[in-house]
Image (tube, grey):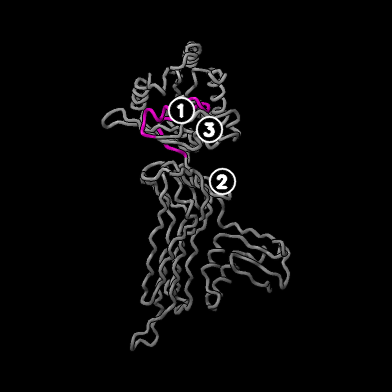
Amino acid sequence: MQFIDRVKISVKAGDGGDGKSSFRREKYVPKGGPNGGDGGRGADIVFEVDRNLNTLLNFKYKRTFKGERGGHGDVKNQVGRSAEPLVIKVPAGTLIKDQATGKILADLTVEGQREVIARGGRGGRGNTRFKSASRRAPTFAEYGEPGESRDLQLELKLLADVGLIGYPSVGKSSLIAAVSDARPEIADYHFTTLTPVLGVVRTGYESSFVIADIPGLIEGAADGVGLGHDFLRHVERTRLLLHIVDASGLEGRDPVEDYHKINGELRRYSEALTDRTQILVANKIDLPTAADHLPALERLAADEGIKFFAISAATHEGLDGLMKYVGHWLEENPAEIVSAVEGVKVFDLDGGDDDVDEILIERDDAGDFVVRNKNLEKIVAMTNFNNDEGLRRFQYIWRMKDVDRQLRERGIKEGMTVHIGAMEFEWRE
């Protein structure tokens, strides 16, 4: 199965249903009052963690998602049906970002976790809702509010208990193949592993843990060199790191120097990674040259204050002891979800502390005036300008917002064009 861990998609929540404009028409009731019902709410776009998924492959073939519209209101004050949420399933460890701003909207890490990413529009109000002492027979109703639209970037950061780190060709793929059912490609050249591989290690009848073989690091990875950030973002989720070095040194590499270089890249990418518990694992001890490097590696582990194991993934020497220790460490250190960004769990869809009443007036390339205000733009979308009462209501709100004065201060003249939302009109005093 192809592993995909980063995709771009677009979502559009459902529009609200239109409100109804109608009046009672019973026999012997010549002046029946308004009885138009409200429209139903549009479908929210909801992301949900599904334990059966471990890749974003499904989004390679479907990148646009649109929620259902709410039902329209009807006579006799009947309210339109609200649409069911559109639920999009993703694997645990999925980070959802806004493409335009890069803002993190949600960090989905727990089985069954659900987050609303785009809200459905509310239903338009029927003409019954506008009845008052001074307006006995309102003829206008609202259109449904448009649902939110978002362009998103999904990033998968693996949720593994244990991550294998180290230079290419130190034997990480061989190790995970030896201790789990995972079957990564294994060869003698660098970067055999181009995508992360997950394996389940069973330490007892009912106990196991997940181990991740992640593409190897090189110098400059923190700057994105090589597989760079594609590797490092997966490391952020792991609870324990097995730092694998090639004890044989057959390629002319110094395993002690490799250890320091890899940790230097981790430190440059995220200081938090340097606090993650590591175990130093010297692999390939079945080769004769390994004996020359083992004493230095043992001293390194002692100086760093970390546990040291010498193994051979090829002959399985030392693997049982290593896996038992890892299983015991995980039991002694209960799982805590490591958030991709400190403190991020849920988000504010409305844009944080921005003042929703602030009116921004700009000039476009054609010299037209563009009025930006969330509330006004919603009212424009929900107003039936073909209805005289609806038009007068909008004009009243426009005056109450004092938009005329602000346009004059910006230098608007008779006959100039004003845009707000999807509507444009010619300015007249």
Q: Position of residue 395 (x, y in %)?
A: 58, 71
Q: Position of residue 222 (x, y in %)?
A: 58, 32
Q: Which residue is more in the foreground, 24 or 120?
A: 120
Q: Which residue is more in the foreground, 39 or 208?
A: 208
**Which segment did they paint magenta?**
157-182
Indicate which disc, 1 or 3, sits on the residue closer to the N terminus. Answer: 1
- Disc 2 and disc 3: Cα gap in Å? 30 Å
Magenta stretch holds residue 179: yes
Label 2 amino acid? Answer: Gly
Mark 3 packing: few (<14 Cα in 10 Å), some, or many (20+)? Answer: some
User: Which of the labelled discs sits on residue 191, or is there none?
Assistant: 3
Label 1 amino acid? Answer: Lys
Q: Nearer the viewer, mark 2 or mark 3?
A: 3
Which image quadrant for residue 68? bottom left
Q: Are marks 2 and 3 in contact (CB under 8 Å)?
A: no
Q: Position of residue 242 (x, y in %)?
A: 44, 25
Name the residue tied to disc 2.
102
Magenta stretch holds residue 282: no
User: Which of the labelled discs sits on residue 109, or is there none?
Assistant: none
Q: Name the residue rendered at 53%, 17% in the picture.
A: 256
Q: Are marks 1 and 2 in contact (CB under 8 Å)?
A: no
Label 3 amino acid? Answer: Phe
Quadrant into which the C terminus falls: bottom right
41 displayed left or right of 226: left
Q: Is residue 131 visible?
A: no
Mark 2 lies on a secondary structure that is: loop
Q: Position of residue 148 (x, y in %)?
A: 50, 58
Which image quadrant for residue 202? top left
User: Which of the labelled discs sits on residue 172, or is there none?
Assistant: 1
